[in-house]
């Protein structure tokens, strides 16, 4: 479904990603870990279409990913992307309105009724059916993130991008959100890419865990080389085996280049 061929991304002289070669099948749940600044979120932006690659190819169903977001790709950030002046229901309906062509994106008549029915259905699916008329300031952090997920799913995307979506939540709420995402992944047949700094979370949710890291370093020019996917680990439901596998991989030293 997704394929990258010798993908590079850099900003001026700062190389962020280099030599990414990968294939992702439909239905994979990819979790991505690595140190801050190693290109995980940049890769999500390339998938979303808000950033363009510097060279190489990034394909979806054998065609270049468009250089703009589309309904087949939904995204949820750590910071809640909701409108404070709108109710829960209006927030989700707005996601439908913004996807329409035209100057205003306003919904009228049958289009408005259909959007309302679709919004109510997805809000019920994420457990917000009793909060349709509440405003974001009346919601807990977990409820706001459920709202953001509902917004992302309303367009029925095939690919869901999650950029540290649960990092600000308490452990108990995170566990609830983990189960919600797993249920939605299975029920909707989604292909998911999720950035996380929590290794346990990566193993618990994903079917494959990617480790982003630099394999080349130059102390004189730290931005001369970018990160790549150093390990692509199939995740077993025996997390101890997966963790042991990662420990064995990361015990190998990185290459240092000195000029």
Image: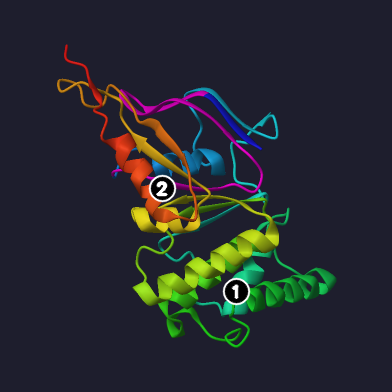
- Quarter holding the N terminus is top right
| Viewer-nearest residue: 179 or 71 | 179
Q: Which contiguous range is marked in magenta?
A: 6-35
Q: Residue at x 63, y 67 (%)?
A: 94
Q: Between disc 1 and disc 2, whose residue precedes?
A: 1
Crowd tier of the residue under label 2, counting other residues whose Cα lies within 10 Å: few below 14, some 14–19, many 20 or above: some
| Viewer-nearest residue: 76 or 20 | 20
64 versus 93 height, above or below? above
Crowd tier of the residue under label 1, counting other residues whose Cα lies within 10 Å: few below 14, some 14–19, many 20 or above: many
Horizontal arrangement in the rendering, residue 122 relative to residue 20 (left or right): right
Does the magenta stretch mainly form a helix, a strand or a loop? strand
Horizontal arrangement in the rendering, residue 128 relative to residue 255 (left or right): right
**Local SS, label 2:** helix
Q: Residue at x 70, y 35 (%)?
A: 61
How far is disc 1 from disc 2 in space, using C-alphas? 30 Å
Query: Which of the 4 image quadrants contains residue 218?
Result: top left
Residue 155 seen by the camera: no
Q: Is residue 7 magenta?
A: yes
Residue 20 appears at what percent x and percent y? 47, 27
State the residue position of label 2: 242
Residue lying furthest top = 259
Residue 187 appears at what percent x and percent y? 69, 63
Residue 213 seen by the camera: yes
**Local SS, label 1:** loop
259 versus 4 height, above or below? above
Horizontal arrangement in the rendering, residue 170 relative to residue 189 (left or right): left
Query: Which of the 4 image quadrants contains residue 34?
Result: top left
State the residue position of label 1: 126
Q: Residue at x 53, y 72 (%)?
A: 146
Q: Is residue 181 magenta?
A: no
């Amino acid at each position: 479904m997704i394929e990258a061929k010798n993908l590079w991304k850099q900003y001026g002289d700062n190389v962020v990603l280099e030599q990414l070669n990968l294939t992702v099948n439909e239905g994979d749940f990819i979790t991505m870990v690595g140190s801050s600044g190693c290109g995980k979120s940049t890769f999500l932006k390339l998938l979303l279409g808000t950033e363009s690659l510097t060279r190489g190819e990034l394909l979806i169903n054998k065609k270049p990913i468009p250089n703009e977001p589309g309904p087949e790709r939904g995204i949820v950030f750590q910071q809640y992307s909701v409108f404070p002046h709108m109710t829960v229901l209006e927030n989700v309906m707005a996601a439908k309105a913004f996807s329409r062509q035209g100057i205003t994106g306003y919904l009228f008549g049958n289009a408005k009724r259909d959007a309302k029915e679709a919004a109510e259905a997805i809000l019920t699916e994420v457990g917000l059916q009793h909060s349709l008329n509440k405003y974001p300031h009346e919601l807990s952090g977990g409820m706001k993130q459920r709202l953001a997920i509902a917004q992302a799913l309303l367009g029925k995307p095939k690919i869901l991008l999650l950029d540290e979506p649960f990092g600000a939540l308490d452990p108990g709420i995170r566990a609830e959100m983990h189960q919600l995402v797993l249920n939605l992944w299975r029920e909707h047949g989604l292909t998911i890419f999720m950035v996380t700094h929590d290794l346990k979370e990566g193993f618990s949710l994903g079917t494959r865990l990617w480790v982003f890291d630099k394999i080349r370093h130059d102390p004189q020019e730290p931005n001369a080389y970018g990160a790549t996917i150093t390990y692509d680990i199939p995740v077993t439901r025996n997390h101890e085996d997966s963790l042991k596998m990662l420990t064995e991989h990361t015990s190998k030293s990185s290459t240092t280049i000195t000029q």
